[in-house]
Structure formats: C-alpha cells, structure tokens
Image: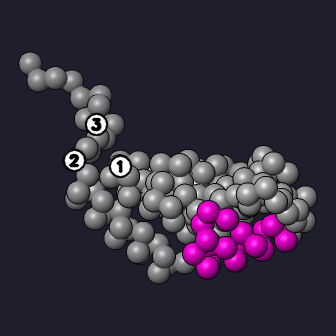
Amino acid sequence: MVSAQSGDAGTNFSLSQARALSAYALQNDRPDLALQLGKGLLKADARDPFAYFVIAQSYAALGQNTQGRRAAARAYRFAEARPDRMRAAQLAAQLAFAENRPSLTQVWLRRTAIHVDNPEDEAQLARDYRALRRINPWSLSCAQIFARPAT
C-alpha cells in the first residue's frame, strides 16, 4: 500500500493504483502529487526504478534539476530493461544540461548511447553529443592526461 497525504487526511492506494495515479499526475501538470506518490512507492520498494523515474520527472517539472538528475541516476541504476535505462539516462542528461554541466551531460549521453536500438535515435544522439563538445569548455583525452611535458 502507498499512502498519499493531503493536509490531515491520508489516502491509501495499491501499488498499481499509485503507479497509474503518479503517471496521470505527471501528464496533468501535478508534479507535486506525482512526487508524493513516487516517494510512497519507494517506501514499498527502495529499488523501484519506476518510482525514481517519477520522482525525477516531478523534480524536473518543479525546476529542481539537481534532485531530478540524482533520482534519474537511481532510476538508471535499478532499471533492468534497455529502454528504461535509455529513458533514465536521457532524462539525467537533460537535467545535467539544465544545470549547465556539459561534461556530466556528455557522460549521460554516452550512457544513453549504450542502450539505443535504432539508427534514427543513434544519429540524433551523435548530433547532440557533437553540439555539446562544441560548447563544453573542458575537453580531455587520455593522450592529454598522460602526455609528457616538452623539454
């Protein structure tokens, strides 16, 4: 059972009802309710990738990008299916970009690339990555790190 609190009144939902309601809340511009339901889902299962994804999307809608990226990272960690891992990595990349963290965005785009299944998505991801490389002030390679200084 998942509990949602509003003021003094609480309501209990089954896990499937809480999942459906959290998705409905996100689709209908109620990230506050979705966040509350997502946290309730985590009380039932602390490794639930769906709950972390709902929380990440809720934080994103509330403009709390750092918390959203962290929740997306947990969704990625606990997801088992490739499409779920890809969506979580994409969301983490979007939120890292919103935080103005281009290097971290590139890391998450690389993780997204691992799970891409079709050529169109792969091409779009490559374009996004190239665009990020142009705007990222940091660029390191192993050759740069291990190069000997000139004498």
Which residue ends up furthest to the front in the rendered image? 8
Q: Amino acid at mark 1?
A: Arg
| Residue 76 seen in this snapshot | no
- Assign a secondary structure to mark 1: loop
Up the image or down, 147 lies above or below 96; here it is: above
Q: Amino acid at mark 3?
A: Ala
Image marks 1 and 2: residues in contact by CB distance under 8 Å: no
State the residue position of label 3.
143
Q: Position of residue 8 (x, y in %)?
A: 79, 55
Residue located at (46% from left, 54% from top):
65
For the magenta stretch, what is the residue range? 17-33
Q: Earlier in the sequence, mark 1 or mark 2?
A: 1
Up the image or down, 138 lies above or below 128; here it is: above
Q: Left or right: where does residue 127 sit relative to residue 117?
A: left
Q: Nearer the viewer, residue 103 or 11?
A: 11
Asked if the magenta segment contains residue 133, the reply would be no
Q: Residues within 10 Å of mark 1 (few under 14, many from 20)?
A: some
Tell me the quadrant of the picture where the C terminus can be found.
top left
